[in-house]
Amino acid sequence: MSDTPVRPGRPTVRKLPQLPSAVRGLAPAPALRLSRPSDTWFKPALSVVVASAVPHLTLLAIGRLDLIVYTMAGSLCALYGHSLPYARRARAVAGVVLGMAAGLAGSLVTASLTGSTAVLIAVGALLAAVQKVLCDATRIGPPGHVIFTFVSSAALFAPQHLGQIPGHLALTLGAGAFAWLVALAPALVRREGPERRAVARALEAAAVCAEDPGPRNRNAADPSPRHRDAADPGPRHRNAAAAAVHAAWQCLLASGRPTPVRRSLERLVVHAEAAFVAPGPGPGAGAADPERLRAWAARTRGRGPVPTPPPAPGTADELYGIDAERAVLRAREGRRAARRALLRRLGPGSPLLPVAVRTLIGCALAGYLCAALGVGRPYWAIVTAASLYQANITLSWNRTLQRTLGNLLGVLVFAAVLPVSRIGPLALVCCCLFFGFAAEALITRNYWLGSVAVTPMALLVLEFGGAHPAGELIGDRVLDTVLGAATGFLAATLVTNRRATGRVEQALDVTDRARAAAERTVADPAVAPTERDRARRALTASLVELREAGDTAAGEWWQRALPEQRLLAAERAGHRTLAATAPRRGPTVHAPSIGAE
């Protein structure tokens, strides 16, 4: 069910003449390999079960299980926002509910006005493309656009009358409001839970970086990414630590007013940052004790008190800078800047535009092909095609393999469980709830494993409107999966994304400016510590964006060659500048009532 984000892989294709290496990079084994489950897999799994169980059982009690498709649209909103602090989660999930209702309304109105399959497929493909762009631009996180497309595409092919639409939308909004309550309910028990997890991840990443930062000058004669990753894991560890520390600061900045627990968490991030910017022996590396960082991470992740570390150099200045930054973000100008950034991601020059075109063309072709072959539910092909499109074509290929294998195995599970679900309405409801939980529990291991549970759940939803021949459902699902995956990936290969390299070049320019600004603060002793800390955080954010842009472009096909040497040099220079800021963060501040760990 969830569209778990996968961090883009290492370069496979640089330019057209290197096609053979790309083909070797498309081996199925890495795409299908299982990974460790997410540390929060149970949160969306339990949330969607609770958010679905109440509406399902209510409709069962009044004998209207045929309306479950509308309440399910709202219940699935409980899958979103679990990595966000509760202050931001409240706004994000509310936006998801409204977006879900808007997409459903468009589908229901279209279905009530026309019965033309061609028009319905065109509207479904257009909605899928819009939902993909909006989810990527707002960075809502997993499960991304797939749930929106699943709901809106299915509603397009459901019989509908204009007079029924207000009542059906009311069911969706009511279930969505309950899902909103479910998503925020943990705040009553542990209101800093998301912040604690984000800080724990930063501490763990910093511990890895501090333990094995890698020689500074190793492979200087061969700075290629392939050689660097094989012999020197240091840059990879520093990139991971930078991303985790940046995510922790962003989580704390969005968490609302400071509390004693959040103050302790901010001090822990200062220590993680000190270990990341200057790993190994030397000035500024006093906090880089991997065992201590891991011990702090374990206690931070647990339910006990947050550890209160000794103040690192410049801690008071750092926290003052964080407060100032939080105030700027919450001010009117800060909100305007955030809106302008969102509009830039949606504008004509957005790197998301080629992915939107891929989604539109791929979903339309998949739907029309299935309709031409006489498949009764072309929306399954639309959803299959929409689910394939990831950050680049290499990841889209991986998702194609995962989706196809998961769906094919899932129809076998559906065939086995169908007799059990037909024992009675309660058995059908329980089966849907079970597979909803299983999907979220398994999907963080690998997308194909979660799809094994998603497929029978999607097929069982049709049973709420009446029994269908099992052979027909299974045959249609298999055909839609194969055609949707093949057509969707074909569209991804035909619609090139030449803007990926341009995004890298823009990120390089931003990183160069951020590094120059940070170097000026280091060279000028008169600069306020808060300005120095703000410049360091800006440089960290630019390095994270640069690595994301580089990884995305590296997995894209048929584009001009990446500026690999400049990319690697910018990363190295940025990390050296970050390390230079560590000993210049100001004098050690001994805060009272803060004990050493």
Image (tube, rainbow, N blue to C red):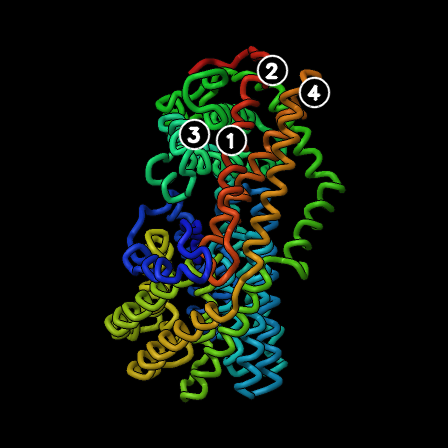
2 or 4: tag closer to the N-terminus: 4
Residue matched to label 1? 575
* 3 and 1 marks in contact (CB < 8 Å): no
Residue matched to label 3? 206
Label 2 SS: loop
Categorize mark 1 by other alpha carbons within 10 Å: few (<14), some (14-19), many (20+). many
Residue 539 vs 458, above or below: the answer is: above
Depth order, front residue of 425/499? 499
Q: Is residue 423 left or right of residue 391?
A: left
Label 4 SS: loop
Coordinates of residue 264 in the picture (x, y in percent): 52, 24
Residue matched to label 4? 527
Q: CA distance from mark 1 to mark 2?
A: 20 Å
Coordinates of residue 170 in the picture (x, y in percent): 59, 68
Coordinates of residue 195 in the picture (x, y in percent): 51, 36
2 or 3: tag closer to the N-terminus: 3
Residue matched to label 2? 586
Q: Amino acid at mark 4?
A: Val
Q: How many marks?
A: 4
4 or 3: tag closer to the N-terminus: 3
Categorize mark 4 by other alpha carbons within 10 Å: few (<14), some (14-19), many (20+). few
Which residue is pictured at 66% across the width and 34% down the height?
Answer: 326
Q: Nearer the viewer's eye, disc 1 or disc 2?
A: 1
Q: Amino acid at mark 2?
A: Gly
